[in-house]
Amino acid sequence: MSHLKCECSGLSEFISSNYDKRKFGTIVNEYLYKKNLTTTELSENAGIDRKLISKFVSDDHYHPSKDTSLAVCIGLGLNSREARKLLKLAGYSFAENSRRDLVVLYALDAGVCHISEVNGYLKELGEKPFKE
């Protein structure tokens, strides 16, 4: 049985040049500041409990669900480019074969920043709405 040797110097270099050590909560805090929003406003816009927001902005090890991540993108009023970056940090992406994900992308680029409006689009198309 042969074992492949790891080119550790190449691997280390690859990781150091591609690794983003920022956490989801850190980026959310940056956007809150940049967009002059409070956590209360984010909570209302995203339909997410303030305790959950407090948890992910203060706990570097908290891993949000995709729905929570999408709701945060909406609540922050991100555009699709910003949302793709934030989702990527959470380990998710927009699925091009998901009507629900495409509705969110459309809404973000249309400037929608409240979950109830996105839910209206989703319900119109017979897709699962977000919890509010």
Image (tube, grey):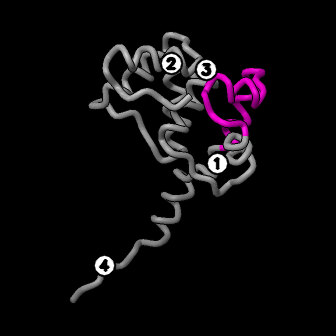
First of labels 2, 1 by sequence position:
1
Q: CA distance from mark 1 to mark 4?
A: 33 Å
User: How far is mark 3 from mark 2, CA to CA?
Assistant: 7 Å
Question: Which comes before the other along the chain, label 3 or label 4?
Answer: 4
- Of pointers 2 and 4, the one earlier in the residue sequence: 4
The residue labelled by disc 3 is 77
Mark toward the viewer: 2 or 4: 2
Question: Is residue 13 shown in magenta?
Answer: no
Identify the residue under disc 4: 4
Q: Tell me the quarter of the image containing the N terminus.
A: bottom left
Circle 1 is placed at which residue position?
23
Does the magenta segment cover residue 43?
A: yes
Q: What's under tag 4, amino acid-wise?
A: Leu
Q: Is 111 drawn above or below residue 2 in the view shown?
A: above
As drawn, is 76 to the left or to the right of 104? right
Q: Nearer the viewer, residue 127 or 16?
A: 127
Residue placed at 75% from the left, 31% from the top? 39
Horizontal and vertical percent for residue 46? 61, 27
In the drawing, does residue 39 fall left or right of residue 14? right
Q: Nearer the viewer, mark 2 or mark 1?
A: 2
> Disc 2 designates what residue?
108
Q: Earlier in the sequence, mark 1 or mark 3?
A: 1
